[in-house]
Amino acid sequence: MAITTTKLGRAAGLCALVAGLLYIVVQLIHPDENVAQVTTTAWTATHLLTLAMAVLALFGISGMYLRQVSETGVLGLLGFLLFGLFFLVVVAATFVEAIVLPAIAGEAPGYVNDFLATIVGETVRGDVGSFTVANGVAGGTYLLGGLLFGIALYRAGVLARWAALLLAIGSLATLAVAVLPESLDRLAAFPVGIALVGLGYSLWREGDQPR
C-alpha cells in the first residue's frame, strides 16, 4: 500500500476525532482524585484512556498543522507548539498516574495525596518535586496553545471554522473552572473535546476533496 500525504492527513484526522471522543468520555468516567481510588481498576482504565487520548491528539494536531502550514503562519506554529506541549505533558503525567502512583499508594500515601492535590488545586503539604511546575505548564499551554491554534485554524479557513472557533473559546473558557462548582469542573473540557472531533472529521473528510 502506497503511503501518500492524503492518507496520512486522513489518518491524522481520524486520530484527532477519536482523541476528542476519548477526551469527553474520560471526563464522564474519571474517578475522584484521592488515594483510595488510585488502586482501583476504574482509575487504571481511565488513565490508560487518557494516555491514548493524548498520543492520538498529538498525531491529530500535527496533521492539522502540516495540512495548512502556509495558511496559519507564525501564529499557527506558535499555537501548535504550545498545544502540542500540553499533550506531551499530559502523556508524562498520565504515565505516572497510571503506572507509578498505584504501585506506591500503599507505601507512600502522603506523596500520592500531594501529587493529586497538585492536580486539583488543593493544599500540598509535602514535596512533589518539579511536578508543580509541570502542572502549571500544562495549564498555561492548554489555555494559550488552544486559543492561538484555534484562532490560526479559523483564520486559515481550511478546516471547519466552527470547530476552530470552538477550540479557541473552549480553551479560554477553562478560566471559568476557578469559579465553577467542583462537580462541574470537568464539563469545561467538553467544548475542546467537541472541537477536536469536528476538526478531526473535517481533516479526514478533506482527504476526499480534490486539491
Image (cartoon, grey):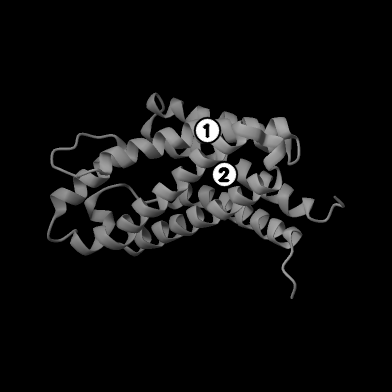
Return the x and y of residue 92 as percentages of the image width and height: 36, 53
From this view, report whether residue 209 is shown above or below residue 76.
below
From this view, report whether residue 133 is shown above or below residue 203.
above
- Left or right, 2 with respect to 127, comes to right
Query: Which comes sooner in the sequence, label 2 or label 1?
Result: 1
Residue shown at 70%/56% (left/top)? 9
From this viewpoint, is residue 55 visible? Answer: yes
Q: What amino acid is labelled 2 in the image? A: Gly
Task: Check disc 2 and report its element: helix, strand or loop.
Answer: helix
Quarter-wise, where is residue 118 in the image?
top left
Q: Which residue is mark 2?
A: 193
Q: Nearer the viewer, residue 95 or 32?
A: 95
- Left or right, 12 with respect to 101, comes to right
Q: Nearer the viewer, residue 54 or 175?
A: 54
Q: Residue furthest bottom?
A: 1
Rate crowding at label 2 as few (under 14), some (14 to 19) or many (20 or more) other CA atoms within 10 Å: many
Q: Nearer the viewer, residue 77 or 10?
A: 77
Q: Which residue is mark 1?
A: 171
